[in-house]
Image (cartoon, helix red, strand yellow):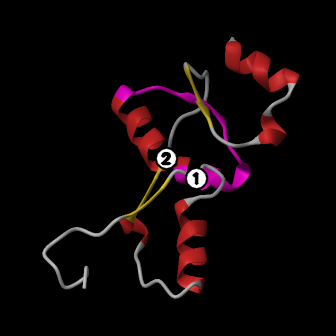
């Protein structure tokens, strides 16, 4: 019914553990017929903010989430993006983030 209604359809999630591509594959396996541009995640929001603010982030996100930041400059970071990524929360990485 939503597809035939005059509304925009979006699938919204707050996950930071996987990219939109991975989410799309998982939803397709469950029988959803959706396109990648219909998925809006917290990573999408983070990327949009990074682009608007023209900052270079240190990405403390799961490796599976990195594809959502393709093309975003991360050299000489002046911002930090934090997602659910326990493997990246160690002394060395936290020091980089605080600096």
The kind of secondary structure element at disc 2 is: helix
Indicate which disc residue 42 carries: 2
Asked whether the residues under the numbered discs 1 and 2 touch, taking CB atoms below 8 Å apart as contact, a structural biologist would say yes
The crowding category of the residue bearing disc 2, from other C-alpha atoms within 10 Å (few below 14, some 14 to 19, many at least 20), is some
The relative height of residue 5 versus residue 23 in the rendered view (above or below) is: below
State the residue position of label 1: 15
Q: Residue at x 58, y 58 (%)?
A: 19
- C-alpha span from label 1 to label 2: 6 Å
Task: Residue 70: tell me if it is visible.
Answer: no
Q: Which residues are magenta?
A: 53-68
State left or right for residue 78 relative to residue 90. left
Looking at the rendering, in which quadrant would you find the N terminus? bottom left
Q: Position of residue 92 (x, y in %)?
A: 85, 22
Looking at the rendering, in which quadrant would you find the C terminus? top right
Q: Position of residue 37 (x, y in %)?
A: 37, 66
Please say whether residue 43 is one of the residues in the magenta stretch: no
């Amino acid at each position: 019914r939503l597809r035939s209604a005059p509304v925009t359809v979006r699938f919204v999630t707050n996950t930071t553990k996987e990219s939109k591509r991975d989410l799309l594959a998982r939803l397709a396996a469950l029988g959803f017929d959706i396109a990648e541009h219909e998925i809006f995640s917290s990573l999408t929001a983070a990327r949009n903010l990074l682009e608007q603010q023209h900052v270079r982030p240190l990405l403390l996100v799961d490796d599976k989430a990195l594809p959502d930041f393709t093309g975003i400059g991360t050299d000489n970071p002046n911002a930090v993006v934090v997602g659910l990524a326990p493997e990246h929360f160690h002394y060395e990485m936290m020091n980089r983030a605080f600096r």
